Image: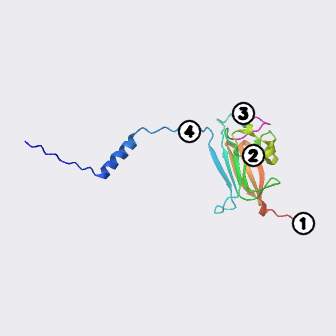
């Protein structure tokens, strides 16, 4: 008796399906994201269609409940930044007045020294630092003192830009604290000669 051997042809699409199935069913590596404080971005634009003049990348810490206050999260009179790891970055795409200081285009670190009645706002040329402990005051570009204003309670730290009567401000808000930082494009400022 003769046994006939039959050739089995496997088509390439069938092989591809098997490989994809094996790849899909293998155990995927778990990704651990331990960022306790999410990041956000705020833009200053003259219109929704225009290129940004300023971009701020910052952390958004939150108050845990209605009883927790801002004073429970920060220490007045000490250098503070909203993210545990990195300094808040502020990028000027054009020359800007930050308060009364003319700042050239570039990326800077934004550091804060909160107080009950007044906050110090520091613009520093070192923005790629890990933690406030590497703060170098010799790299300061601008240093402002801003009086604290009150607003409705915000559970999460936020930064936005406002414009009122052609004056722009960068607003920092958390709990009932509001800090209004004057900010203006250098080419929008008009000087009157007397």
Q: Position of residue 180 (x, y in %)?
A: 77, 49
Viewer-side label of 1, 4: 4
Circle 3 sits in a helix, a strand or a loop, which is it? helix
The residue that label 2 is drawn on is 178
- Residue 42 magenta: no
Tell me which residue sits at (32%, 48%) in the image.
Answer: 15
Q: How far, Cα to Cα, is label 4 from label 3?
A: 26 Å
Return the disc, 4 or 2, that comes first in the chain's sequence: 4
Q: Nearer the viewer, mark 4 or mark 2?
A: 4
Contact between marks 4 and 2 (CB within 8 A): the answer is no
Residues under labels 2 and 1: Cα distance? Answer: 34 Å
N-terminal of the pair, mark 3 or mark 2, is 3
Tell me, yes or no, whether the highlighted magenta stretch contains residue 81: yes
The vertical placement of 170 against 189, above or below, is above
Question: Which element is circle 4 on?
Answer: loop
Marker disc for residue 193: 1
Instruction: Find residue 99 and report its horizontal and vertical position in percent.
Output: 81, 52
The earlier-in-sequence mark between 1 and 4 is: 4
Q: Residue at x 76, y 42 (%)?
A: 112
Q: Main secondary structure of the magenta part?
A: loop
The residue carrying mark 3 is: 72
């Amino acid at each position: 008796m003769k046994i006939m051997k039959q050739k089995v042809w496997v088509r390439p699409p069938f092989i591809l399906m098997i490989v994809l199935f094996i790849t899909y069913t293998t155990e995927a590596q778990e990704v651990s994201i331990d960022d306790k404080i999410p990041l956000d971005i705020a833009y200053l634009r003259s219109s929704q269609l225009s290129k940004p003049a300023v971009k701020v990348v910052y952390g958004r810490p939150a108050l845990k409940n209605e009883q927790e206050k801002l004073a429970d999260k920060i220490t007045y009179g000490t250098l503070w930044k909203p993210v545990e790891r990195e300094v808040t970055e502020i990028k000027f795409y054009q020359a800007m007045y930050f308060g009364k200081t003319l700042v050239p285009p570039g990326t800077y670190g934004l550091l804060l020294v909160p107080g009950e009645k007044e906050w110090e706002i520091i613009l520093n040329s070192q923005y790629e630092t890990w933690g406030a402990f590497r703060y170098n005051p010799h790299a300061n570009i601008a240093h402002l003192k801003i009086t604290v204003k009150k607003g409705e309670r915000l559970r999460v730290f936020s930064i936005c830009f406002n414009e009122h009567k052609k004056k722009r401000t960068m607003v920092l808000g958390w709990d009932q604290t509001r800090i209004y930082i004057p900010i203006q494009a250098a080419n929008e400022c008009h000087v009157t000669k007397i």
